[in-house]
Image: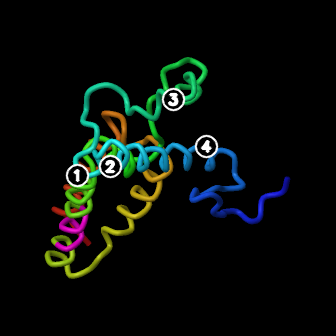
Amino acid sequence: PDAPSLFWISENSLYSADGNLNWRMYIWQDIIMDLKDKDKILLGYGYTGIIPVMEWYSGYRLGLDGLNEHVHNNWFNIIARGGVFQLMLFLYLNFLLIKTYKEKHNNSTILIFMIPVLVVSFFDASMENAHFPLIYYFFLGRYFKVGK
């Protein structure tokens, strides 16, 4: 059947006509529901083991090789691991980076670099490896020093 639109809500869940995005949105919504059901929304699951919702559906979410444990969304990964508390710290860090840069350089050009990375990390596992965030934050630090 045809999807009503690109996004729609049915039975208290958000759906998408795009199969890949729909698969990811299932995971993200399951994280929130599972955290809520287990009363872990404030502090999350912690950092031991994989995020529980990735084990569901007889390994379906683990991928063909059984090794996928990424929720493909840095923001939801932060919520899952450290809860709303850690997400607020992450958002506050980014707010401070922008505010401090603006005060120091009297402009907001740092957003040209930050916004694309934050948007991409909302739909990809790029911030879930060892090198990408390191390069990103080193670059921001260098940009702070040099500025424009």
Q: Identify the residue shown where x is 41% and y is 43%.
A: 34
| Mark drawn on residue 147 | none
> Type of residue at label 1?
Gln
Q: Nearer the viewer, mark 3 or mark 1?
A: 3
Q: Nearer the viewer, mark 4 or mark 3?
A: 3
- Say which quarter of the image contains residue 70: top left
Q: Nearer the viewer, residue 114 or 48?
A: 48
> Type of residue at label 3?
Trp
| Mark drawn on residue 79 | 2
CB contact under 8 Å: marks 1 and 2:
yes
**Label 1 element class:** helix
Q: Does the magenta-highlighted stretch encompass residue 67?
A: no
CB contact under 8 Å: marks 4 and 3:
no
**Label 4 element class:** helix
Mark earlier in primary sequence (4, 1): 4
Mark earlier in primary sequence (1, 2): 2
In the rendered view, how is the structure colored?
rainbow
- Say which quarter of the image contains residue 45: top left
> Type of residue at label 4?
Trp
- Say which quarter of the image contains residue 20: top right
The magenta segment is 94-99
The residue that disc 4 covers is: 23
